[in-house]
Image (spheres, rainbow, N blue to C red):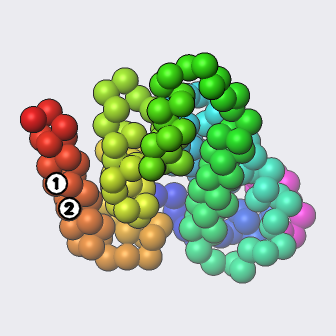
Amino acid sequence: MAHPDNPTVDRCLSEIKNGSMDSLAVLYDITSKPLYALTYSYFKNREDAEDALSDTYLKIVREIGHFQGQNGFNWIYTICKNICLNLLKRKKRESAVDLSDEKTVNLLDAKDSAETVIEDESGIIAHAKRHLKTHEFEIVMLHAVGGFLFKDIAKLHGKLEATVRWQYHNAIKKLQKLIGEVIL
């Protein structure tokens, strides 16, 4: 997945800041796919991912006065990521707890219960979130699930591509070791 052209994103954001809402449609066209990949990596369902994406564009318009004129995609990415994290926290608080359900009680008693937000059939994503460092998990999700290229992830995090690639491979090795221990 290609990283959106920062000068174009910066130009659109500057035009929105100056009152041109026509530029919002252009901004959406060039940023919605990578941002949707990010939101989907957090929620694993279309409805919540689309809600987070919509909230992102609303917040961009509300907070446009804070845009400094450069690194626009990074600014938008940070907004989107924070919205996802806040929505996950809110969903966790709002979810009803059935204390008669043995599985729920066991999860509440577990040391890492706060880390069991993401579930998938194989459990690999939940294990990854629980056992990887936050930045490692994010890199794995962006690359393996979101389809981001290492160079694009590096730009988003302000790191060298080689560093991101190394962190990704180390995270995968941790997961392979963890899965091997779980199976054995």
Residue at 73%, 65% in the rendered image: 13
Residue 25's disc is none
Q: Nearer the viewer, residue 86 or 166?
A: 86
Q: Which residue lies furthest to the left in this view?
A: 184
Which image quadrant is residue 92 in? top right
Residue 173's disc is 1
Q: Which of 143 and 23 is in front in this view?
A: 143
Mark 2, other Cα within 10 Å: few <14 / some 14–19 / many ≥20: some
The CA distance from mark 2 to mark 1 is 5 Å
Contact between labelled residues 1 and 2, with CB atoms less than 8 Å apart: yes
Q: Which of 125 and 150 is in front in this view?
A: 125
Q: Nearer the viewer, residue 13 or 162?
A: 162
Q: What residue type is labelled 2?
A: Asn
Which image quadrant is residue 93 in? top right
The verdict on residue 139 being magenta is no
> The C terminus appears in which quarter of the rendering?
top left
- Whether residue 14 sits left or right of residue 72 in the image: it is right
How far across and how far down the image is residue 180, in percent? 12, 41
Mark 1 lies on a secondary structure that is helix
Mark 1, other Cα within 10 Å: few <14 / some 14–19 / many ≥20: few
How far across and how far down the image is residue 79, in percent? 67, 60
Q: In this view, does 43 lie above or below 114?
A: above
- Magenta-tinted stretch: 17-26
Residue 170's disc is 2
Mark 2 lies on a secondary structure that is helix
The verdict on residue 18 being magenta is yes
Residue at 37%, 62% in the rendered image: 133
- Whether residue 144 sits left or right of residue 184 in the image: it is right
- Whether residue 60 sits left or right of residue 122 in the image: it is right
Residue at 32%, 76% in the rendered image: 160
Q: In this view, does 163 lie above or below 82?
A: below
Which image quadrant is residue 20 in? bottom right
